[in-house]
Structure formats: structure tokens, C-alpha cells
């Protein structure tokens, strides 16, 4: 069951009740975040990418995965970050080299998109659900939007209200080519017809993020990735 704890804002002293989110490991087992009741919340003045993630170990398969750090927005305008016990988790044990059958994926659990950061979180969680590990900010900053990456993958998240253009798709594809990686594009506003046609030619998977936080594939490469995952 999700864990709920009382939270008092250090700035305005308002009382809140926060329920810890539960995410799903790639093996399908829920991985609940354990909150530290002994530590008070911290006011986040300058959010950074690295501090927005916390490492959680799956109790079933031993895999470690990064999940969004628990945060709560107070009506006074302060962003509160809650302490999590037992992190960072120790490294996962090496898996046996013997072949194993691929476990069926559990249903994707989306996060509601209200801000640009929510869009990035939704895309990162979806990539994790597809089987990509070590989600992080991309080394190369794109001309627009936000770049995230995993081993062998570069992804672009476009949280604007402008449909992605041919140039946007080509820039992502060229970046992936220079890094010998695959690429995926996530957009809130969709794509122009030319951009979608170009993505089909280049084999770039395209996804549209709806406000529920569920990525929907809109071309053949996107549908193939959604069905097969990273394997």
C-alpha cells in the first residue's frame, strides 16, 4: 500500500499529508518509495536534474532504477522535497549469463502532465518501462526542448505547443548518429506532416504525450518500439 506521511512546510508552517508514489520495475513488480519520517522536508530553491531522481532497489529482481524524487508543492509557492530512507540503493547483483525468458511487462503507470518537467518525467518513466536503464540528461543540449538519454539511446522531449518540425526530427537523428545510438522523439503538440514523413524515412520512433502522461506512438517505428521494448 502507498505510504502517507504528514508534512509541514518549513516556510509557512502549513500541514499537508503526502502519499508516496509507487512505480513499477521493468520486471513488473511495484517499487514503493520509503519515506523517512524522521527527516523534515527541504525547500527546493534551485532544482537540478540530478537531485530530482532517487535510486530504488526492486525487492523481487534486485534491479536498481532511478525514480522521480518525492516532491510536494505548497500553496505558499515553495517546492518541498521529501527525504527517502535507504538511498542510494546498493548496486544490483550481476545476473546469471544463462538465457532467461522475457517477463511480460506490467501496464504502464503514467504521471499527469502539468508542467514541462512533468513531460520529461513521463517520457523518462516510459523509457524505463520499455526497458532502458540509467535515464539521465543528455550530454548534448538540443536547440529546443529537453534531451534525455540512456545506454544506447538519445531521446528528445518537446513540451511546447508547437508541432515538431522536420528540422527537429533531423537534429535528433543526427545527434543519435554521432553517438552511435538509437533515438526517440516525444512531443506534446504532435508533428507536422513533413516531420512525420521524414521520421518514417529515417526510422525515428515518434510519440505524442497526452496530458495523462501516456505516450502514444504515431508512426511505424514508434509502434514497433512500444511493442518490443528495448530488447
Image (tube, rainbow, N blue to C red):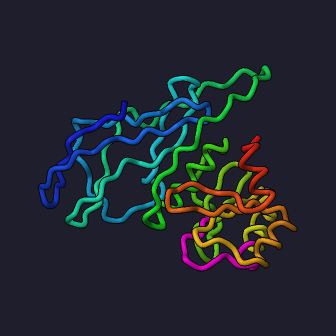
Side of 157 where 35 appears, left or right: left
Across and down, in percent, residue 12 comes to 13, 60
Q: Is residue 25 above or below residue 177?
A: above
Question: Which image quarter holds the N terminus?
Answer: top left
**Is residue 152 one of those drawn in magenta?**
no
Is-magenta flag for residue 168?
yes
Quadrant of the rendering where the C terminus is positioned = top right
In the image, taking residue 65 as reference, residue 196 lies left or right, namely right
At a point 57% along the width and 53% down the height, the residue shown is 124
* Image height of 137 relative to 101, above or below: below
Q: Quadrant of residue 2?
A: top left
Instruction: Identify the residue at image location x=58%, y=24%.
Output: 61
Residue 57 at x, y percent in the picture? 50, 31
Residue range of the region highlighted in magenta in the rendering: 157-169
Q: Residue at the location (61% across, 43% down)?
A: 129
- From the viewer's side, name the closer residue of 188 and 57: 188
- Please provide percent x and percent y for residue 99: 79, 23
Number of marks in the rendered image: 0
Residue furthest to the right:
201
Task: Using residue 68 as the reference point, say whether residue 11 is left or right of it.
Answer: left
Instruction: From the top left corner, tell me how far across and down residue 155 is, in percent.
Output: 67, 60
**Who's the residue at 42% across and 34% down the image?**
32
Residue 177: quarter of image: bottom right
Nearest the eye: 209 or 41: 209
Amino acid at each position: 500500500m502507498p505510504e502517507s506521511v504528514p508534512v509541514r512546510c518549513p516556510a509557512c508552517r502549513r500541514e499537508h499529508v503526502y502519499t508516496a508514489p509507487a512505480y513499477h520495475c521493468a520486471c513488473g513488480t511495484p517499487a514503493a518509495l520509503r519515506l523517512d519520517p524522521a527527516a523534515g522536508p527541504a525547500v527546493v530553491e534551485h532544482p537540478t536534474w540530478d537531485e530530482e531522481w532517487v535510486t530504488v532497489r526492486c525487492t523481487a529482481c534486485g534491479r536498481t532504477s532511478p525514480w522521480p524524487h518525492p516532491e510536494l508543492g505548497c500553496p505558499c509557492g515553495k517546492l518541498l522535497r521529501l527525504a527517502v530512507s535507504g538511498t542510494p540503493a546498493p548496486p544490483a547483483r550481476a545476473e546469471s549469463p544463462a538465457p532467461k525468458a522475457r517477463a511480460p511487462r506490467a501496464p504502464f503507470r503514467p504521471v499527469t502532465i502539468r508542467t514541462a518537467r512533468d513531460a520529461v518525467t513521463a517520457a523518462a518513466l516510459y523509457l524505463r518501462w520499455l526497458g532502458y536503464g540509467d535515464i539521465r540528461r543528455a550530454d548534448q543540449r538540443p536547440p529546443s526542448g529537453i534531451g534525455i538519454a540512456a545506454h544506447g539511446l538519445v531521446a528528445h522531449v518537446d513540451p511546447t505547443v508547437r508541432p515538431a518540425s522536420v528540422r527537429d526530427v533531423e537534429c535528433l537523428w543526427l545527434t543519435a548518429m554521432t553517438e552511435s545510438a538509437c533515438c526517440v522523439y516525444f512531443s506534446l503538440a504532435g508533428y507536422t506532416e513533413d516531420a512525420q514523413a521524414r521520421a518514417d524515412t529515417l526510422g525515428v520512433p515518434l510519440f505524442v504525450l497526452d496530458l495523462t502522461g501516456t505516450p502514444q506512438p504515431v508512426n511505424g517505428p514508434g509502434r514497433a518500439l512500444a511493442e518490443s521494448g528495448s530488447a
